[in-house]
Every structure is written in C-alpha cells, then in structure tokens.
Amino acid sequence: MFDANQHIIHIVDGRLSPKSKTSRDDLGRIVTQALAANAPSGIVLHFHGGLVSESSARESAEKRLYPLYAERAKAYPIFFVWESGFFEAPINNLGEIAQEKLFQEFMKKVAEWVLKKLPTAAGFKGGGGASVDEPKLRADFDAWFSGQRSTPPEQLETLPGTTSVGLAAKTKGVTLDEQDLAADIEESIAGDANFQDALQAVYNGLHADGQPHPTTRGVGTSVSAKSLVSKEAADILFESVPNTTKGFGPIAWFKVAKAVASIVIRVIRRFRKGRAHGMYVTLVEEVLRELYLDKIGRIGWWDRMKMDTADAFRDGEEYGGTALLAELKTRLEGMATPPKITLIGHSTGAIYICNFLKAAAQRAPKLQCDVIFEAPAATHALLAATAAEHGSRIRHFRQFGMCDEREATDVLIPILYRSSLLYLVSGLLEGEPDEPLVGMARYLEQADIYDADSFPNIESCRRFYARYPNSLVWSPSKAGLGLSSDGRRHGEFDDVDEQTMASVQHILQNGF
C-alpha cells in the first residue's frame, strides 16, 4: 500500500525544510527503506515535469505511478516532488493574450504581409504576392478568433506534398528591405480602422492619466483598456515622453509599421532556413516575442524552472538532490551487489536527470544508472554535454516521445497555440526560436536542415542514441515489448498512456 512518507521526497526551491514536508532524516529513512526492500526490479527515481502542482504530483504518484512501479514492475519507487505548479501563471497569460484585440490585429496584419511577400508558388493555400485575398483572410481570422471556425484560416495551410526543405528552397530568393516594407505596411495601416482601434485601446490603457487620447490618424477614441503587452513593446509602439507624468506621447505609426515589418521578416527568414513551426504557429511565436515576451518569456519562469532542477544539487545537505546522492554514496559503497537504479524523467524531469548525473560525478562518482526519458524538454545542447561528460554513468537508455505529426497538432492552448508544450519551449522559451529539443522528433529526422556541420549538438546526440539499442520510441509505435507507445498529448507519457506504461514496466522487469 502506498505511503507518501516512504516514497516521496518533497523539496521547495531545491531544499529539504519544514515547508517541504521532507526533512533530512526523512530522506535518509526513505533511502534505507528502499535498499532494505530489495525489490526485484531495483529502485526507481521518478522526476515529474514542470507545470505540475504538489497535489497533482502526489495524486499521480499514489494513484497511477506507484501501482505501475511497485505493484506491476516490482520496483521500489521514490518520487521527487518539486513544486513546479506555480509556473502555471504564464500559461494562463497566454489564454488571455489570445483574446486581446491587439494580438488578433497583429496576427492578421503580419499574416497578410508574409503571404504578400512570399512567392505565389511557395506552397500555401493562400498563395502569395498579389494573389492574396485580404478580405477573406481577415474574415477567416475573425471567425477563428470568435470560435466560428474550428481551424485557423486555410490560407495559412501548406499545399499537399509541401515540405520544410521545399519551402526553404522556394523562399531562398525572398529579400526584404525593412524600411521599404515598413513604409508599405504603414500605408496599409492608414486604411485599417480595426488595427488602429486596437492600438488606440492599448495606448489608452497604458497612458499615465488613464484617459482616451486621439490617434494621429483621426480614428477617434476608444475606451481605456488594459493589456498584457510588455513595457518593451510599448516603448517600440509609442513615443516616450521623458520627465512627464504622461508616460507616452502620440502613437508612432511608422514605429508600429516597423514592428510589423520586423515580425514579417523574422517569419520569412525562419521559412527560408527550414526552421518554421508551420505558418500559424510561427506567426503566433513571433508576434508573442515582439509584444508579450515578458509575460511568457524565459526570465519570468522558464529559466527559473530549469534553475529549480539545478538548485537541488547545490552545496549543503539541506538540498534534496545533494542529500540523496550523499545517502546513496554512503550506503551503496559497502554493498557487494548494489541494486539497479533507474532514473525516469518526464518533460522537465529529464533536465532534472541531467543535473543529477552531473552532480553524481562529484558526490557519488561510482554511481551508475539506467535512464528513461519521457517527452523530454531538455535541449540537444544539454544532452550532448551530459553524454560527453557523464555518459559513462548511463548503463542503458530509452526515450519515448511523439512523432512530429502528433507533436505539431497537440493543442496546448485553444486558439492561441496549436502545437505541443515542447513546441512552445522550442519556439519561445529558449534562447532562439526553434531551439532543438531532444523530445521532438523533427530535429533528428530532418537531417537535411539540422545537419551535422550546422548543428553539432544534434549530431552528438545522434551518436549518443546510437550507443544504445532501440533507444528511441516515437508514438505511435507497436514495435514490441518495451518499445510500444501511443502517447497523443505531451502530458500522457508518464502516467496516462497505457502502452508507454507497459513498455516501462517491461524495461524495469526484463531490461532494455
């Protein structure tokens, strides 16, 4: 029977403390019990992903993972519960952003000009150049944002048979001058009352006196509105008035046009390099980067989440990971036959495992483990460094994830983001758009784009995977025992998808 006191190490900001509900003595007792159990399938250390509240992590451990590991696989599970649920706020922000008129109007404007500047034969249903049907594109966007369409505008879809490599080849010759493009866009804004009203509403909401202010185009005034637009974006869109209480001067329409032009150029460059995430999702990513990055960006929460996984291994045995490694080192050294230890990490939990292996080099240098990644959110750079420096500690390895078709259509946030959490991390939260993540099949499969010379970390990971038989399992897979998976959503891999869970059970009981 599950007893949280015997199986859960709860840490907060990396620490064991009264707030964390696990003391240093508790941790020592858990390790002692795990070794004394002498479970046939050894010990499992499970690291859950991000965006998971304490209550959800505990419920998953008790109701789904303990039965899998202890009862079915005959292992002794220890669960790291690490308080990542407070990172849900940025995801909630994204849902609010989707309803903002500013976001919606920028999406329409950027989409219109991306299609206009792409060649007619680029491979999109909306064509390119002069063939773009602007009124229909805007009407379809309105229907999509209001819920009257079940899919984004069809003009943004690629024609059958269109590939990333093909799109890259067809857009190679597209060259754009930002100043000229901005001038054209400014002219189009002059006749677009909806776009102007959206800017005016945000301007009124941001203005220091909170009162409506007429635009320089004579569109009139709108009610004061609040927005999640970033301070940096406001500085780009509106003229500043230093040393006054007003905060911003008149809307600078040429600056607005330049902001639109900058997004258009970034989108086209991503297609030219073969590094777009589909038209709609790429538009969303680049508009968010321009206007809302502080609400969904790295500094606010993603870097903090990754830092939490590293903090557990700081100097001092009040840190949960450090204390665990100290206990394992002390207790395993005197054992003639140490138990098998399997590290299982879902999503951000894979980053936790990389930090575990790095810390083990100093704190438990003889420790070796089997490793299972489930939809990992680690970058190829992190895994390449981990494999190069600590790969000798990994006895066996297997990774489960979705094929790219499923990854690209795993809707994270209705209307706003039509792909998976890993796509969001790759497209928005790491240092550059389309940062290669190990849990995404596209980076290993599209070798023409992510080649060895341009992406040495991906090539290093390819070599790492090749060291282990059948190391990669992409859902849907029915390749046999230990190699099957049917995960359809990012969050399903560790405790929902029965095929993946059965594969993990088989691995624990019978090996890789």
Image (tube, grey):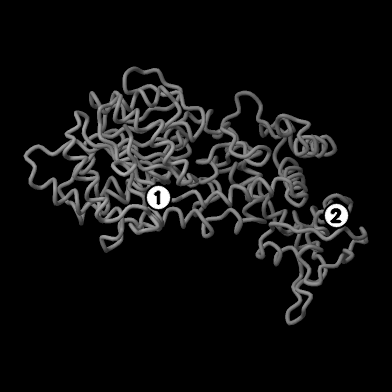
- Ranked by sequence position, the earlier of labels 1 and 2 is 1
- Alpha carbon of mark 1 to alpha carbon of mark 2: how far? 45 Å
> What residue sits 78% from the left and 48% below the top?
105
Considering the numbered disc 1 on the image, is that residue within a helix, a strand or a loop?
Answer: loop
- Along the viewing direction, whichever of 75 and 19 lies nearer the viewer: 19
Residue 363, quarter of the rendered image: bottom left
The location of residue 393, given as percent across then percent down, is: 21, 44
Considering the numbered disc 2 on the image, is that residue within a helix, a strand or a loop?
Answer: helix
Which residue position holds label 2? 197
Up/down of 328 relative to 505, above or below: below
The circle drawn on residue 82 is 1
The circle drawn on residue 503 is none
The location of residue 386, given as percent across then percent down, is: 30, 48
**Count of numbered tags:** 2
In the displayed structure, does residue 386 sit left or right of residue 84? left
> What residue sits 58% from the left and 31% below the top?
409
The location of residue 178, given as percent across then percent down, is: 70, 57
**Residue 512 in view in this figure:** no
Residue type, label 2: Asp
